[in-house]
Each structure stands twice: as structure tokens, then as C-alpha cells.
Image: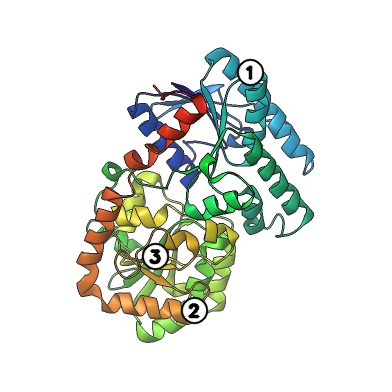
């Protein structure tokens, strides 16, 4: 079976989106399927029309000249549609597999209709909800409602829908889509790609000023929905009970400047270490410095519906963490067993959760084992990707070969 995947962006760019994509493609190939891959203009300008990254060949799309909002999205879709049709005519795939956002689904639907190729659509998050978090629109606005309507239009016209979690599945079915046409491909991890946490690098610890400290940390992109502002807000109370506590924030993103300003305003700038972005190969060294990871996501549609990768990656590495009780976390975390959940948006609850976990150090080995077993036995990519098989078979009217 030959599948042509249509993607927003891919490796070598680093994001949860690209890591999930690479894992899916490798596991599909392990099943004997032939996969091809096209990224949208949002990959950015590329030196060649195709690029081999870690053994995966990604076809690239020309980037159209920028335009005003609305017109710009049309230009992006037209450019992608043209490139997709060119590839589809050359490759003759059995299935066009579009991945969110809807800007990828619409061109796939149009090309699939013209060429008689079945189209499936995989939703990892709703574009309109991501735009709310990025501050480019607000829930209920004209743009929000128009985007939601376009998403629903696409869902009704594809041959099958995939999504990453039960929260999104419920929302999709709630739009009138037959539940039998919606399959969950859960977020997972490649166990072989994660080693159990190691000993802290003493040189790096000293360089970052963390000698003798208990380290509360976060590694990733600094988006507003991650709730890192809540973590900093809790720090004065945490320091009162745990003077040796420090926060290590590894990464960067839209909230970087705001978080630095907040730390200064709270008088804790000397207790918060910002490393900036670090090379991917070096990330594990920073993880090893952290005693307790924090995932304090705010409650909003995006975080209530979507499951993140970070808690699964933490479990795969035997890390100890606290996380807010948004819907996306509750699908992944067994409270008190594989991690500790606390009430989202609640500073006292965050403070209590950190204090409780620091007092439960004797239980940490048991928590580590439980988390590792969960990802080994339940949330691994082989098991997750197997869910594509019956859906593909239904679309093709025959077993995928």
C-alpha cells in the first residue's frame, strides 16, 4: 500500500508535531507500507524540492508571497494543492493522508476528488483553538467561527477521520460525524529512543548555579497554554517552605520575555534559570538536572481536548512530575501512580502538589517503574499505529498490503 502524507511541517524542525510524524512514518514502514511525505509552505523556504532527513524523504512545497490574513491562507492552500496534485499524479498513492491543520485537508480533498484517490484526515488539534492561544483570534470571533465551519466541512467530506485522543474524538463526533468513521491513534513513545534518567552532570550543574538545589523544571516550548506563569507565581510560596528550590526552564518561545519579566517582578529572578534553546542531542543532560518536572497547563479548549507528548516522554525516562488536571493530562496520567495531578490554574494546589511529591521521595522508584511500564505496555508506537490498519482497509475496501 502506498500512502502520501500531507503535513504542516516536518523534521529537521523540532516540535511535538514533527516527532509524532516521524514515529508514525517509521512504524508504518515497519508494517511494510510505502510512505511518501509532502510538507506545506509553512515548512519555510527550502534549498531543494525534496529533502532526506533521518532516512525519510520529504517533498517540499514552494512558499507563496505573503498576503493579508485570509488571502494568505488561500495562497498557502493553492500552492499546496498544486504541488500535491503534481506528486499524486507521479506517485499514484492508494490513500492521501492529510494531517492537521485544515489548510492541508482542503487541498487533499480537492486533489483526491479530481484523481479518484481516497482521503483521510488526521486531527492533532483544531486550528481555531491554537489560534486563540497564539493570540491571533478569540473564541467565538468571526474568524474562529469561520475556521470551525471549514474544519467541519472537511470532516464531512473525507473518507475517514483520525485523531490523537478521546477528547478530540468526542468533539468530532459532536459535530455530527459518524463515530464509526473516527479512529483514535493515541500519542505514544518509541521506548527504544528513551533511556532511563541518568546522574546529573556536575559541571553543567555548577555552570547553571544549581549546586545544592532541588530543581523544579520544564523542558520545551514556552507557549501561554503551558502555564509556566503559574509555576513562577507559585515560587514565592514554594521558597518559603523549600529555600533550596530552583526553577530550571529549558527552551524558548513566545512567552520567553514575559516569563523573564515576571520572574523579575516577583523578585525571584535569581531563583529561576533560563537556559534558552539547547541542541536536541544535549536535552537529556538538562533533564538529568531536574528533580521534579512540572506541566502546569492552563485549562482551555486546546489543553482540555489534546493530549501532549511530554508526560509520556517523562514516563519513558523514569522522570517524576506533577501536571495540571486538564483533560489532555487526565487521559495519560494515573494520579498518584505514574504522576501527580493538581487543580489547573490553582496556585495553592500546585504548591501542595510540589510539596507532597518532595515529601514522597521514598515512593519515587515505584512511580518511575509504574510510568515506564505504562508506556512500554500501553502507549508505544507499535500498538498505536496498528489502529490505522482496519480504517485503511475500510477506505480501500480491502486489507492494506
- Mark-to-mark CA distance, 1 and 3: 50 Å
Q: Residue at x 39, y 21 (%)?
A: 401
**Earlier residue among tags 1 and 3:** 1
Q: Position of residue 277 (x, y in %)?
A: 46, 52
Question: What element does badge 3 sit on?
Answer: strand
Question: What element does badge 2 sit on?
Answer: helix
The residue identified by callout 3 is 217
The residue identified by callout 1 is 115
- Can the viewer see residue 388 in this picture? yes
Q: Residue at x 42, y 52 (%)?
A: 309
The residue identified by callout 2 is 347
Crowding at dot 2, Cα within 10 Å, few <14 / some 14-19 / many 20+, comes out as: some
Q: Residue at x 34, y 57 (%)?
A: 314
Q: Nearer the viewer, residue 375 or 357?
A: 375
Q: Nearer the viewer, residue 358 or 143?
A: 143
Identify the disc placed on residue 326.
none
Q: Position of residue 88 (x, y in %)?
A: 58, 19
Q: Position of residue 126 (x, y in %)?
A: 61, 49
Amino acid at each position: 500500500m502506498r500512502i502520501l502524507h500531507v503535513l504542516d511541517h516536518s523534521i529537521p524542525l523540532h516540535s511535538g508535531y514533527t516527532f509524532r510524524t516521524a514515529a508514525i512514518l517509521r512504524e508504518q514502514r515497519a508494517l511494510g507500507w510505502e510512505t511518501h511525505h509532502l510538507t506545506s509552505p509553512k515548512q519555510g523556504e527550502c534549498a531543494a524540492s525534496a529533502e532526506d532527513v533521518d532516512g525519510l524523504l520529504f517533498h517540499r512545497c514552494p512558499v507563496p508571497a505573503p498576503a493579508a490574513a485570509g488571502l494568505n491562507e488561500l495562497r498557502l492552500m493553492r500552492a499546496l494543492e498544486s504541488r500535491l496534485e503534481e506528486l499524486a499524479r507521479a506517485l499514484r498513492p492508494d490513500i492521501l493522508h492529510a494531517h492537521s491543520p485544515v489548510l492541508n485537508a482542503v487541498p487533499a480533498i480537492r486533489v483526491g476528488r479530481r484523481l479518484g484517490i481516497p482521503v483521510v484526515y488526521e486531527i492533532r488539534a483544531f486550528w481555531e483553538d491554537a489560534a486563540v492561544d497564539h493570540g491571533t483570534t478569540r473564541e467565538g470571533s468571526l474568524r474562529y467561527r469561520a475556521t470551525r465551519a471549514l474544519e467541519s466541512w472537511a470532516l464531512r467530506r473525507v473518507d475517514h477521520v483520525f485523531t490523537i485522543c478521546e477528547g478530540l474524538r468526542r468533539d468530532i463526533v459532536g459535530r455530527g460525524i459518524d463515530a464509526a468513521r473516527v479512529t483514535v491513534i493515541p500519542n505514544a513513545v518509541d521506548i527504544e529512543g528513551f533511556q532511563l534518567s541518568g546522574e546529573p552532570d556536575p559541571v553543567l550543574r555548577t555552570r547553571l548555579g544549581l549546586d545544592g538545589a532541588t530543581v523544579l523544571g520544564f523542558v520545551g516550548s514556552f507557549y501561554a497554554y503551558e502555564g509556566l506563569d503559574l509555576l513562577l507565581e507559585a515560587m514565592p510560596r514554594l521558597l518559603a517552605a523549600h529555600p533550596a528550590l530552583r526553577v530550571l526552564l529549558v527552551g524558548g518561545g513566545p512567552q520567553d520575555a514575559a516569563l523573564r519579566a515576571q520572574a523579575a517582578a516577583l523578585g525571584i529572578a535569581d531563583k529561576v534559570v533560563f537556559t534558552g534553546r539547547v541542541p536536541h542531542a544535549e536535552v537529556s543532560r538538562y533533564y538529568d538536572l531536574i528533580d521534579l518536572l512540572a506541566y502546569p497547563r492552563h485549562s482551555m479548549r486546546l489543553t482540555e481536548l489534546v493530549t501532549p507528548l511530554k508526560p509520556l516522554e517523562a514516563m519513558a525516562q523514569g522522570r517524576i512530575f506533577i501536571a495540571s488536571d486538564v483533560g489532555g493530562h487526565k487521559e495519560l496520567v494515573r494520579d498518584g501512580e505514574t504522576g501527580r495531578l493538581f487543580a489547573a490554574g490553582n496556585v495553592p494546589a500546585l504548591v501542595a502538589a510540589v510539596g507532597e511529591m518532595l515529601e514522597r521521595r521514598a515512593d519515587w522508584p515505584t512511580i518511575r517503574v509504574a510510568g515506564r511500564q505504562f508506556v512500554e505496555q500501553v502507549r508505544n508506537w507499535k500498538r498505536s499505529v496498528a489502529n490505522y490498519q482496519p480504517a485503511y482497509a475500510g477506505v480501500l475496501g480491502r486489507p492494506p498490503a
